[in-house]
Image (cartoon, rainbow, N blue to C red):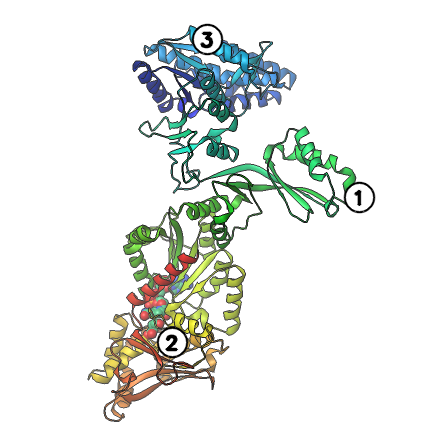
Amino acid sequence: MKILKFGGKSLANGKGIETTIQIIKEKAIRQERIAVVLSARGNATDELLEMLEKAARKETYREELTAFKAYQSQIATSADCLEEFTTLENLLQGVSLLGDYSEKIKDQIMSLGEIIAAKLVTNLLQKEGVNAHFTDTRSLIITDNVFGNARPLDLISRKNIINHFKSYNGTTVNIVTGFIGSNQNNETTTLGRNGSNYTAALLANFLDAEELQNYTHVDGIFTANPDLVADAKKIEALSFNEANELANFGAHILHAKTIVPLIEKNIPLRILNTFNSSDGGTIITQKTTAKGIKSISVLDNVVLVNLEGRGLLGRVGVDARIFKTLSENDINVSIISQGSSERGIGLVINASEASKAIVSLEREFENDFYTKDVNKISIIDDVAVISIVGQDLSEFHKPYNALIKNQIVPILFNNTVSGKNVSLVVKKSQLHKAVNVIHGQIFGVSKKINIAVFGKGLVGGTLLDQIVKSKIAILDKNNIKLNVFAIADSQHVYLNKNGTADNWQDTFSKEKVAYTVQQIIDYSKIHHLENLIAVDTTASKKFIHDYIPLVKNGFDLVSANKVANTIEYSFYQELRLELKKHQKNYLYETNVGAGLPLIDTIRLLHKSGESIKKIRGVFSGSLSYLFNTFSVEDIPFSTVLKQAEEKGFTEPDAREDLSGNDVARKLLILARELDLKHELSDISIQNLLPAHLQTISLQQFKENISDLDETFKHIKANQQENNVLRYVGDLDTETKILEVKLISVSSNSALGQIKGSDSIFEIYTEAYKEQPLVIQGAGAGAAVTARGVFGDILRLTEKL
Ligand SMILES: NC(=O)C1=CN([C@@H]2O[C@H](COP(=O)(O)OP(=O)(O)OC[C@H]3O[C@@H](n4cnc5c(N)ncnc54)[C@H](OP(=O)(O)O)[C@@H]3O)[C@@H](O)[C@H]2O)C=CC1
Ligand SMILES: N[C@@H](CC=O)C(=O)O
């Protein structure tokens, strides 16, 4: 025989009840031997409780009662539930008159949900030609007198069930009320939390069933709650021991008491989805998988009780008093944590028992308050427990580090000595994000990186296209899901927590909204986005002031914008202090040499103690292109400048290049990498712009760029033969002189031979004294720069 158990959602009006009837009917037609245990339908249990509470408060419950009756009789009007409805009315009336109720009355009312469900389903099945028999467990499962959480008396209940199933056998399908029983005085009792599952497990045990099939509204047991973790995966099989661990830590389908009767007789439990009959569900047996399973479960209706006191140190019996008090008040403790200093103890209990716990503990420790041995008993109520079942401490550093990187600092953590289980208490507001971070780390399903791109111009736009093109390959190869949740320009943002579409330009123009950076930060919080990166592909002097707020709110930074590294040194320092404080990273490899690996190389040499004496070369890709081309071709300077702009080599305002400012910024960035505390004003800069072009608007400048032609024609003509023009930077760490200027060099020299938009950096160090270390290559351009920014993002993903 198989025991089938259907939960409330499977029995709700509409698709639920229709599918359930179909499943039972098909099995009956195939002459499978089955018995069916039912919960109350839909939200009946909650509705009954609500009506009871209202009646006890002497409030009207009429509307709810009418709705309850209408809902319950909607599917089978001919079914005779009149008796139950009348009983319900009478009981509620009595409670309303008294303004109170006993646990006994409560059990009578709560039992009606299951009785009505079993009567209606029996009726529907009979109409379909199934030989269904309504089986009221109040006459079979005999319990003790603990109303609300009654314990079945094994021998008599077993005998009753066996006898009943002997009488009603063959083609009979017994439709059994879950959750309820009666005491030896024939008074209705209920079996407490998970009561219907418990009834099904008892039946399976008493009848030596070959399997218990628990029909729910989910496909089985998952690696985490799919409502919280989109990447959660179904677990195909697990052992009773593992199920027990999960049961203890929030997997509601698997209450420990429902597993014990199955373990006793080695009866497999299969969790199935009524609404997805093709899925095989999760099977739970004695067999342990070689690797062991891992699953994350959550308890979010808990509080943390904290008992603190200096006088607790070394005192014998304090813990015993705490637990005695709690147990006398029927309060279950799920997690305990005590420091070796013994100055405090933290306990996790059910939220509903918080007040009771505080009152009873305060009473117990009343004298200790006077003697000041105990100074505080407090409750932290906005907490949740995340348990990683199947996890021991040997690999716990991975999820733990990931939590810290995401600014989630667990309030408490605890592991089991035997078995594998680590539990963390976190703030409830951080629960969603924390579960996703842990899940990503443990299952390596894919690490989701949530990216906000500020600046969607030449570089930012190219970066977004590169991400669109490569994200699937990165997911396949590196298990990293790049999720661009925000794209912003100076005025608008397009936000989507699930990532922007591949045609991001269209979506941006259709769905953009005005924004502040704080709103983007808030959005990331509301949607619990983890592993946050803010990418700055603007040239904005304003946006860099949002770096610190972003860092404080959990963002790592990647920037192509040089401004943050080149404004006053005090900001440079402050930013780094905040980064350190919040354990965040800031990568800006493209600040000097676009996609060339320059900053990393300099940093590595410097860190390793190699003394860098001098860095010189052509730092600017755009100026390189300008002078490489202008020196060898007979065309006006303004024409080459336009070409450089069109090729994306220049700054958004090319005067940043021609003024020498951009090269100076690069020099300053390198100097600061070498711990020189220079300011931009310390650099000697040769400005190539005539005064009248410096102060006009960008538009006016573009209209007047031919004003540059005569000057540069003259400079070019006044060189020695075979010489070419190069705009160079020179950083001398010994003299501490930093200068950028236009020079004329032999076309045969190293500087004279560079082509296109190539930058060249000659690095002179202790080891590279005579022959410098040379890094050369494209020093500007949207594609190489975006690739460099992308490289920084990927480098960060390894750290997250
Ligand atoms: N080109 C190259 O070879 C290299 C460039 N870089 C750097 O890359 C950066 C981007 O250059 P590029 O793409 O050419 O510039 P663009 O002018 O093409 O694009 C700049 C983008 O930034 C946006 N923006 C401006 N201010 C803000 C703000 N406060 N908040 C959000 N977005 C803002 C602009 O929006 P809006 O249109 O609304 O103004 C625009 O979308 C620069 O800092 C540059 O120095 C670095 C290395 C090499
Ligand atoms: N305008 C800059 C672009 C990169 O920083 C340059 O030409 O190097």
Name the amino acid type tagged 1: Thr
Residue 164: image tag: 3
Q: Earlier in the sequence, mark 2 or mark 1?
A: 1
Q: Can residue 205 be seen in this view?
A: yes
Name the amino acid type tagged 2: Asp
Judging from the image, what secondary structure is the residue with disc 2 in? helix
773 or 647, nearer to the observer: 773
Name the amino acid type tagged 3: His
Taking the spot 31% from the left edge, 65% from the top edge, the residue there is: 458
Looking at the rendered image, the disc whose residue lies closer to the viewer, 3 or 2, is 3
Residue behind mark 1: 371
CA neighbours of label 1 inside 10 A, class few (<14), some (14 to 19), many (20+): few
Q: Horizontal and vertical percent for residue 98?
A: 65, 16
Taking the spot 41% from the left edge, 17% from the top edge, the residue there is: 36
Q: In this view, does 478 lie above or below 176?
A: below
Q: In which quarter of the image is residue 354?
A: top right
Q: Quadrant of residue 219?
A: top left
Cβ–Cβ under 8 Å for marks 3 and 2: no
Q: Distance between the residues labelled 3 and 2?
A: 90 Å
Q: Which of marks 3 and 2 is nearer the N terminus?
A: 3
Quadrant the C terminus occupies: bottom left
Quadrant in which ligand 2 is drawn: bottom left
710 or 378, nearer to the observer: 378
Looking at the rendered image, the disc whose residue lies closer to the viewer, 1 or 3, is 3
Residue behind mark 2: 662
